[in-house]
Amino acid sequence: MYYLCGKKSLIALLVFLIVSTTARAQDPKWSNSPKYDDRILHYGFSIGLGTSGYHAKLSQTFLNDTVNSVRPTFSSAFTLGFVVSLRLAEQLDLRLLPTVGFYEHQVDYKFLTTTNTQSIESTFLEFPLLLKYKSQRRRNSRMYLVAGGKLSVEAGAKKKEKKKTELRTQGTDFAVEYGVGFDFYMPLFKFSPELRMSHGLVNMLVPDQNIYSQSISKLTTHTLTLYLHFE
């Protein structure tokens, strides 16, 4: 519920900041923080709202059991984190973004007469390390691309509460990430909306001896997130 309540507020804030910043950028007299990018290090924080789900690869056992279909669904995701940006060159930065991510993944199993949904709620400590390639600055805005990797480690005790008769997942993941964003230079800070894709490379499935695990041979994470960076 917290994710959904914050969604409208984040979108409203994003629209307001983009419209107001774009309007000012068209006026030649506005030139916010002209020496901002000359600094070697920048710090800030970020808020992210997105959607995340698993990609499931079916096993050979699936053909012989009573499961008719296995269908992962996408659910809301919410993240909070910090930004540490190191200037490598005029148009290239190295960024570390330690983040706490809150997720709820679901997989729907359809049997002959019933349907069962396996839900996995998890909190991850995430450490994206990204390269940021920036275009030339035009007054108070510029476009950029990011790409890199992300290490995720599950925190909390929720995974220990899952029984061996239920679908369980690993507590560590590594993903490839890439995205696009815009830097808007405000009078007192830089605001950067960023859309980023994440594709997990680790098989998250715990191979328990139950019908849910045995119907799948591989589970990988896929996430699409809108980040709002304030630096």
Image (cartoon, rainbow, N blue to C red):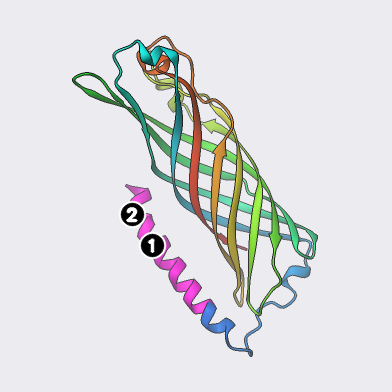
Q: Amino acid at mark 2?
A: Cys
Q: In terms of image quadrants, where is residue 142?
A: bottom right
Q: Residue, x 48% and y 48% (percent of image)?
A: 224
| Looking at the image, residue 117 lies above or below residue 30 | above
Q: Is residue 20 magenta?
A: yes
Mark 2 touching mark 1, by CB under 8 A? yes
**Residue at which label 1 appears:** 9
Q: In terms of image quadrants, where is residue 8?
A: bottom left
Instruction: Describe residue 81's horizontal placement relative to residue 35 as left or right.
Output: left
Q: Residue, x 44% and y 17% (percent of image)?
A: 59
**Residue at which label 2 appears:** 5
Q: Quadrant of the C terminus?
A: bottom right
| Looking at the image, residue 39 lies above or below residue 225 | below
Q: Horizontal and vertical percent for residue 97? A: 63, 49
Q: Horizontal and vertical percent for residue 96? A: 68, 49
Report helix, strand or loop for mark 1: helix
Q: Horizontal and vertical percent for residue 150? A: 62, 40
Return the mark for residue 139: none
Which secondary structure is most common in the magenta stretch? helix
Q: Residue, x 74% and y 57% (percent of image)?
A: 93
What is the magenta range? 1-21
> 3 or 193, which lies in front?
193
Tag count = 2
Q: In terms of image quadrants, where is residue 174?
A: top right
